[in-house]
Image (spheres, grey):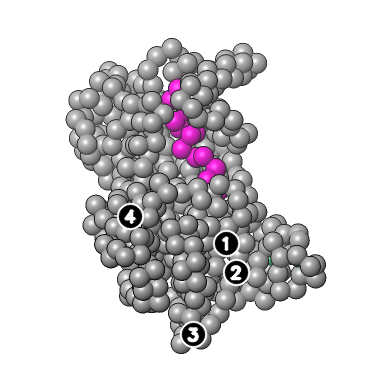
Amino acid sequence: MADRNSNFNSALEGSLLELERLGMSRVLRTEQVKAISTLTSGEDLVAVLPTGFGKSLIFQLLVRVVECLTGKASCVLVVCPLKSIIQDQLAEATSLGLKAVALGNCRLDDISSGKYQIIYGSAEEILSKPFLSCLKKTDSPFHQQLCAIVVDECHTVETWTGQRSSKKGKTDAFRASFGELGMLRSFCKKSTPVGALTGTADPTTRETIKRALNLSQTAEVIYVSPNRLNLRFSVQKVKKEQHLKKLDWLVDLVKKEGINTPKTIVFCNTMNEIAIVVNYLMSQLGKKVFFPNYSSVKDNCLIGIYHSNSWQSSKDRVMEQFKSGGVKRVIIATTALCMGVNFPDVRFIINWGPARSILDQHQEAGRAGRDGKTAHVIVIYHGQQVGHCEQQIKDFVRAKGCFRVAAYKSLDDTIQPLEPPHDCCSFCSSICKCAG
Ligand SMILES: [Zn+2]
Ligand SMILES: [Zn+2]
């Protein structure tokens, strides 16, 4: 055991040195190390780590560590629920010097010959007949080298298997394919571990994940509290007629700061709401919505729109302009923007009506303040917008006490209000007695 530990530690050290050479930080959190070590020793894993924690680094480093330990090439198969995540992940892995590929974009022969270190695919792609027969060819380098199957954003298992949400719109085939992921390991060599990663999963979801993915009963569970101390929660209920007025502070902010407006995302639940919010902001801002002011070209508009029906090219352009200190400062989006998209310096998340589920709400809030600096999550809603939401959302927005405690209650009921109270939420702030 001691031997295994010291081998693991020096393999990890070597892999981190490589990261450092690429200009990346080589400081890992204990939970990341624990996750890598669990998978390295062939044990199953459920890791619930808050957004911004560095979940992807777990399997990116895993490949390198296993390669150091065995002295042979290795690879990881990563199941992703959304194509947009795959694109981001590919770019990230490649920037770390890893040979990564998306299943749709390569020849199976190249996978079979062991050319890649990380292979990304959707559940359907991975469960397709051609890929499965490639995976089970026991004499292929790919079969030999595969060191783990990772299911990213695995909380979506609930929507996909229909275990929690009654949301329609996912086809049965889609659900079935996620359910079938559980049998994937029977195509791999013995003791290939499965790692399930997510940012948000309450105890019920964790059990569903274990069951649906066929994880061992003794799977290691790593859990880090979702409580994001740098987020300030604010919940405001308004009359429907007053709803748009509640965005006037944002209008003033953009008028004053222009191209320096702190990054803001307004999440809406429907296309119609997106249109209403965008029209209001545009009409209130007039020429000031463009940078420079005399321009009226879409690319110079400080406001961007992002939803699942946008053209991919338009989504990419909006993201690019939001990411790199570009001209987009305020994005009006549906929850489609959420997963896997990382901007460190988003200062305001506005929920134009709460998200439909508490997990979505946390995913959306999780876009704020990933740099660790103070950021605000502001839920502005009118009564009609809550009808379609799940009970946990109703409990959150109608809380008679601390909104932080209420928001996290179903994920972790030990979370307490922050001190001093004005740093916590709009309720605590209203009863704070200090001068701050
Ligand atoms: Zn509070
Ligand atoms: Zn105070």
Q: Foreground mark, 4 or 2?
A: 4
Q: Residues within 10 Å of mark 2 (few under 14, many from 20)?
A: many
Q: Name the residue: 71% across, 74% down.
A: 430
Say which amino acid is labelled 3. Gln
Judging by the rendered image, the residue that carries numbered circle 1 is 376
SS state under label 1: strand
Q: Residue at x 44, y 18 (%)?
A: 67
Residue at image mark 4: 318
Q: Residues within 10 Å of mark 3 (few under 14, many from 20)?
A: few
Residue at image location 27% in from the left, 45% down from the top = 124
- Chain part drawn in magenta: 50-65
Identify which residue, 84 or 215, lies in the foreground.
84
Task: Name which of mark 1 and mark 3 comes first in the sequence.
Answer: 3
Q: Residues within 10 Å of mark 4 (few under 14, many from 20)?
A: many
Closer to the chain start, of discs 2 and 1, is: 2
- At 60% from the left and 51% from the top, the residue drawn is 373
In three-dimensional space, the C-alpha distance between marks 4 and 2, rounded to whole angstroms, equals: 27 Å
Check if mark 2's residue and mark 1's residue have beta carbons within 8 Å: yes
Disc 4 to disc 1, C-alpha distance: 22 Å
Residue 89: give x, y in percent of width and height.
37, 39
Which of pointers 3 and 4 lies earlier in the amino acid sequence? 3
Residue type, label 2 = Ser
Residue for badge 2: 234
Q: Earlier in the sequence, mark 4 or mark 1?
A: 4
Q: Are marks 1 and 3 in contact (CB under 8 Å)?
A: no
Residue under label 3, please give it. 242
Tag 4–tag 2 contact (CB < 8 Å): no
